[in-house]
Image (cartoon, coloured by chain):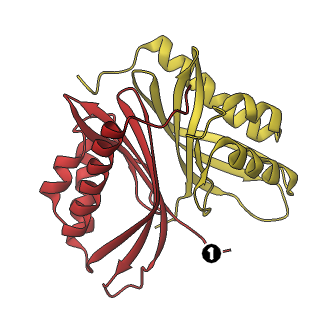
Chain colours: A yellow, B red
Amino acid sequence: MSDDAPDAAIAEAVLAANQAFYDAHEARSSAAMGEVWDHADRVVCVHPGWPILRGWPVVAESWRRIFAGPGRTQFILTNLSVAVDGDVAWVTLEENLVDTGPVDATGAVAATNVFARVDGDWKLVAHHGSPIVAR
Amino acid sequence: MSDDAPDAAIAEAVLAANQAFYDAHEARSSAAMGEVWDHADRVVCVHPGWPILRGWPVVAESWRRIFAGPGRTQFILTNLSVAVDGDVAWVTLEENLVDTGPVDATGAVAATNVFARVDGDWKLVAHHGSPIVAR
């Protein structure tokens, strides 16, 4: 069955990696962010409203720029779900931003985070965030 | 190496599945769209600006609503890349929309499409699209 619930221990490990991503973001730590991602050409990142960024050096630079900018960011993560297929997992969730910076960036972002198991550790290989437009 | 280029035959099969997704969208065919997706609880879809939709019945209904709406849609796909890890692949690209409907929806969308091999066929398990904001 392709839609079996993932093994609980595996799902827990994926969700820990996912939480580490948001912890790194909240801490505005490029070092912590570097621990989260696979350092490979295959990684891709789409920040809300941004074009596609590919390859770890380009993605890393985007985080350095974001962390160098104004504001502090806190997330309340809701509506989270995880699926696992072999050595790849995809997590979807809503990032409810509480940005205390000068720009009012409060709002909800839909995020898809893809993780791959690399030498036993779940590493982020794709992040895609997009603002949810109120309807 | 985690960032080896994918096997050419596998990449070709993934890209064929990816093209079938856009062909189904352009044809506004729920039947063709149904062939593209895995019919499972694990599937997720984020249309540009929309909240997260989960599970095939909910995702299928969203396509029916989109196809029932006004306008015709053509895509020019650019900046395409594919990565494969076991039985999962992720494709990223820009969808350059040429919407001839009453609403001016011309613009570029960054898309992440995740495929999983199900009984030998690559099926779409996650689609996330977000408008690229000109800067």
Residue A47, by quadrant, is bottom right
Residue at figure coordinates x 25%, y 45% from the top left: B37
Relative to A111, residue B76 above or below: below
Left/right placement of residue B62 relative to residue B4 reads left
Query: Going by the picture, which residue comes out furthest to the top?
Result: A9
Instruction: Tell me the crowding category of disc 1: few under 14, some 14 to 19, or many 20 or more residues within 10 angstroms, Cα based.
Output: few
Question: Residue B70's spot in the image, x, y percent?
Answer: 25, 79
Q: Secondary structure under badge 1?
A: loop
- The residue under label 1 is B134
Residue A28, by quadrant, is top right
Chain letter of disc 1 in the image? B
Query: Going by the picture, which residue comes out furthest to the bottom?
Result: B102
**Where does the N terminus of chain A fall, quadrant-wise?**
top left
User: Number of marks in the image?
Assistant: 1
Question: Residue A63's spot in the image, x, y percent?
Answer: 76, 47
Residue at figure coordinates x 56%, y 25% from the top left: B1
Residue at figure coordinates x 19%, y 28% from the top left: B119
Tag 1: amino acid: Ala
Query: Going by the picture, which residue comes out furthest to the front?
Result: B8
Relative to B121, residue B50 above or below: below
Asked whether the viewer can see residue B6, the reply is yes
Residues B73 and A98: in front is: B73
Left/right placement of residue B121 relative to residue A88 reads left
Question: Residue B48's spot in the image, x, y percent?
Answer: 45, 63
Left/right placement of residue A19 relative to residue B38 reads right
Asked whether the viewer can see residue B51, the reply is no
Relative to B53, residue A121 above or below: above
Residue at figure coordinates x 46%, y 29% from the top left: A89
